[in-house]
Image (cartoon, grey):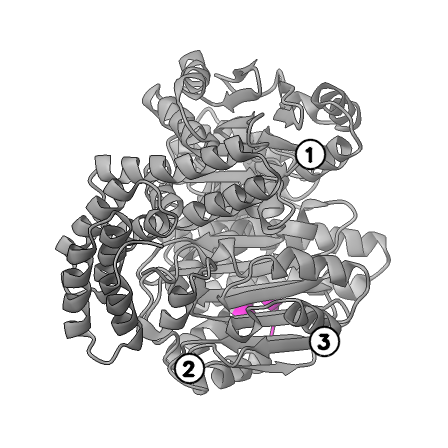
Amino acid sequence: MIHGRRLGAAALVLSALLIPALAHATFSIVAYDSTTQELGVAVQSRAFSVAEAVPWAEAGVGGIATQASTNESFGPLGLDMLRKGMAAPDVVRALVDSDSGQTHRQLGVVDVHGASAAHTGKDCSSWAGHRTGYGYSIQGNILAGEAVVADMERAFLNTPGELAARLLAALDAGQAAGGDKRGMQSAAILVVRPSDEFPEYRTRYIDLHVEDSKSPIQELRRVFQIHEATKLAEAHLRYAEAYEKAGRKDLAQMERTRVGEALKRALARGENDASNLNGLAWTCAENGVFLPEALQAAERAVKLEPKDTGILDTLAEIHFKMGDQAKAVEVESRALALAPNDSYLTQQLARFRAGGAK
Amino acid sequence: MIRPHRVPSFLAGALVLACAGFAGPALAIQQTSTFSIVAYDSVTQELGVAVQSKYFSVGTAVPWVKAGVGAVATQANVNVALGPQALALLATGMSSADVMRALAATDTSWAGRQVGIVDAQGRAVNWTGPRCMDWAGGETGPGFAVQGNILAGPAVTAGMAKAYRETKGEMAERLIAALEAAQAAGGDKRGMQSAALMIMRPSTTHPQYNTRYIDLRIEDHKTPIKELRRVWNIFEGFHLANAHLDFADEYDAEGRHDLARLERDRVGESMQRALKRNDRDVSLLNGLAWACATHDMFLGDAVEAAKRGSAIEPRNVDVLDTLAEAYFRDGQAAKAVEVEKRAASIDTKSVYLKQQIERFQKGPVQ
């Protein structure tokens, strides 16, 4: 017999029926951020490559998690319905009503107005259930107990900051509460966000997979932290620029703050990846925000990679932006000594020596 | 200064432009040294991209695919937006060559871009801008285009094209073979960090395959192609076997029995590959054996795979049940009963196993 990869005996009924669907013993969260218009799904499962099956989201449309004895078609079909303007509760009703295997399915939907709805079929293996509220739906099956979704909900509601951070906090809380009864194998986070200038964000603002790992949530966090220090920092500055153009200075400021928050998180966790630290520090330096934290990060990065001229340049730039011309010159000179033919470093040093205009 | 994640310092010079101008976010100008292949299969209507890069999470940037529309790889000084833009243009019915011209006309940094496109008629084109870093280039063939930049040399893309042409079987196998050939030819000068395999396929009964037939990612790994091969092996034995059987049913319903047969054969090929490489993943062996047994195909292989799975985990009731089912379907009812009794002696409360034993005792398949 076969059921979800390495499933326990709980799914017996399914295999007896020869239902071809794969079982995803899983916990997931679907959520919406009304300020940024982000829609996202985060999920962990004791099944291989959960990203392939469970999370579905499209900017300006909605987010869906389809799991348990997974009917993957709920993803694209549900998005079609949401695109036509159907509300989340109607979408859940329509999908469930049309499915002869509905008692085995679990589904959570959040629409672009923040309305949410979920379904947990009565034949989902216990513990199985869901919690919904404005802007989110949390669901799981074959869980250690109800505390898993309750703690996920609490973590989501109590975590400040950007949607991805709140989704990951929910996964951590779910795992800490016992998580999936049968352990862990894969995880994913998918966040989408409207953008006129960068259409890729509509389907892939954040889209990270952990396909097959002993500690998938931990690995998901690790790759998210790389993403946060590089691509996401870039994305925040792109949105800041777009908001500036649209005259929304408050939102532009918030976007820049996000980069600063990421930097603070990196410092707080004692980040040891020099390029993560450097990426965030440079982004802050370039935009003249969170300079004291940027200085800390750059100093830490230099300690980790003392001969990296790019990192030394970041540190020098921060000193300069903070008005410490002498230190800027000293650090950039060190960089130039390591790469004497580097024309960029030469220009930088000249700029720091000239002082004044930043 | 900032540059792509974990780039060795000898590349610093290349990124001077990115930092010196202060024209916009420094990260916007990143050299993603990369090799990729875009391809179309005229029999299955699959469209796919496989890619490897010394760049974090290449799967979120380079590959863009839509069933019935086309496949795009956007790389080098990457403008990710070219992906969704190209798909939107292809969806209007434009050919890959016309789409490439349209992208060229509207992108002010076109000289730094590298793009490969294949449309849903299999017409493939690629572009390597003169400002892509050495070695950069590619080639096209019927239904595919290979391209790369910051490579060891032209042998990399030539090797990819050759491997793709010469590898038999389904698209995913051919795409991974192309990546492996590229790496064998020296690959990416700067080493490896991430890889992705993305294939879409039109389906009326299973709409998820239109946007997610195969979508595997290795985000940050020392040997991403090897890791991609590893997760692909799990994927093909597990998810893909089900997908093939879905398509077989879809084709049968349309009266396309030849194609239905091809889909079932794919499962058999997966099984043979698993047996040949002596795969020791029990759930994979069990998954393939169950799929074959319950569809009455490749029964000898199904028995063999279940036997191997059972040898690794002798007290795994699921695997024993699969072995029993395979024996039964293969006409060996006595052995089926014996194995299922062993399973029932481990899980004494199972109603399902008792039903199975009764069914096997009644004799051959109806």
- Give the percent coordinates (x, y) of residue B245: 47, 46
Instruction: Give the SS element for disc 2.
Output: loop
- Give the percent coordinates (x, y) of residue B70: 65, 32
Whether residue B119 sits left or right of residue A319 in the image: it is right
Q: Which mark is residue B185?
A: none
The magenta stretch is: A160-167
**Residue at 50%, 37% in the rendered image:** B260
Vertical comparison of B74 with B319: above or below: above
Q: Nearer the viewer, residue A77 or A29?
A: A77
Q: Which mark is residue B69?
A: 1
What chain letter is assigned to the residue under label 3? A
**Residue at 26%, 51% in the rendered image:** B326
Q: Is residue A164 magenta?
A: yes
Whether residue A295 sits left or right of residue A252 in the image: it is left
What is the distance, in whole Å, between disc 1 and disc 3 at their CAs? 32 Å
Q: Nearer the viewer, residue B318 or B41?
A: B318
